[in-house]
Image: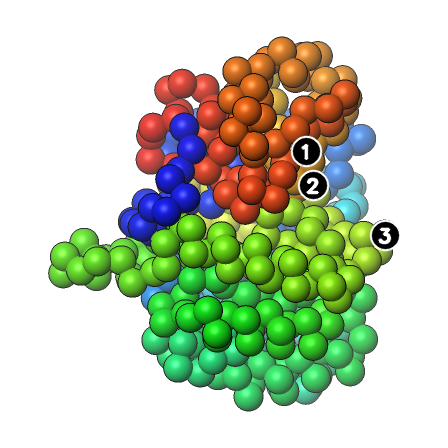
Amino acid sequence: MTTDTSATTEVGSYFISNYPPFSQWKNDYVPSALEALNQEPDASIPLGLYMHIPFCRKRCKFCYFRVYTQQNAKTIEKYVQSLEREFAILADKPGVRGRDLDFAYFGGGTPSYLSSKQLRSLRDRLTEHLSWETAREVTFECEPGTLNEDKVKTLKEIGVTRVSLGVENFNDTILEANGRAHLSPEVLKAYDWIQNAGFPQVNIDLIAGMIGETDENWRECYEKAAEMQPDNITIYQMELPHNTIISQEMKELGVTSPIANWETKRRWVDEAMNYLAEYGYHASSGNELIRNPETDRFIYRDNLFRGSDILATGVSSFGHFQGVHYQNLDKIDEYMDTIATGVLPVNRALVPTDHQRLIREFVLQMKEGKVSLPPLQEKFGVDIRAEFSDALSNQQSAGYLKVEDDRVTLTRKGLLQVDSLLTEYFEPQHRSVRYT
């Protein structure tokens, strides 16, 4: 059930972020998502927000998200108007009405593609309906080349508490080969502005295994990251979902994968973790390192992995509300036209069983490197060690994890390839289906 550690990175590799797989979500379940929004909420469950800003300067060759490049101010204004209508509809739903947002995440695309004026307008108009002023964390993704000093100050002004800077690599040749819009001088300028603004949390992203990566260059990347001393460093291993430019070229032109194999990528991440540990960083998941475990919390991730309510807003965005998974329409014109009629733009959904919800929370928490069993056992009324006995035994024997008392702890070997382990916990009908 696990991936061959020396295997080539082929089309279809995936990073697990939900269960059951997205391919199983159907339009038939949309009424269930709408019904969940119309039900009185469980006040003990935190409420969060995901907002998708789909605009980018360029489409990266490895990107698999819904993005639109080089859009003008008129299109952006129409999109913001649609977001405002969506917020107004959601805020009036019984499941949402009167609740405070505990966390918010602005993802993309490139949220920082918006101008300072557009960002202030977004804040002013949307917070009339759902305000993130109460949120303990507001994360905002930034592409370095879209930032200037005024825009960074604007992010602080509109309530952003956690900036995530998409560095990916410090080598300009590699950045260009992978279709990134920014170059390394823009990274350094943007980072200085961010540090001067004094955000409570700053994260930088790196990707192990980009086209053209070498041992020497990768070492320079994590050494530079340590020198910058951000609060969080996220290191992704390059994957090739079906709808990336690289994947399309491989399928249409019959070319071999230009991405480093899994064994190499895991070795690179392992090296980075070891080096960063010398600078005081601690692994908080298979791809996230933090400087201070007491203060550096990724609240959005913690809630996503534990079944909290997350409102999906914007084109193609994913949400989870009162036990129902759902996703918005994934084409921008269709999304905006639907909102204009006063209808929520939900495109597909799924009502997971209690057992599937248990699997979801267990496997997602495994990505953090350790799972405390009592909270899950109390929540779902199941003996976790008995429920997953075969998979836990297999993976413990293989050296991927240890089961001790009330905790499952992944070894470094397991942590570096955790996504490849998780399908063994899936229900049989989901173990070989397409994930997305």
Answer with mark 2 or mark 1, whichever residue precedes in sequence. 2
**Please, which residue is most extreme toward the left here?**
253
Picture residue at 42% right of the left edge, 70% below the top = 214
Q: Nearer the viewer, residue 419 or 223?
A: 223
Picture residue at 47% right of the left edge, 80% below the top = 171
Q: Which residue is mark 2?
A: 303
Q: CA distance from mark 3 to mark 1?
A: 20 Å
Q: Which residue is mark 1?
A: 409
Give left or right: position of 403 versus 415. right
Q: Residues within 10 Å of mark 3 (few under 14, many from 20)?
A: few
Amino acid carrying mark 1 in the image? Thr
Amino acid carrying mark 3 in the image? Glu
Q: CA distance from mark 3 to mark 2?
A: 17 Å
Dividing the picture into quadrants, the one containing residue 59 is bottom left
Residue 294 has which mark? 3
Question: Closer to the camera: disc 3 or disc 2?
Answer: 3
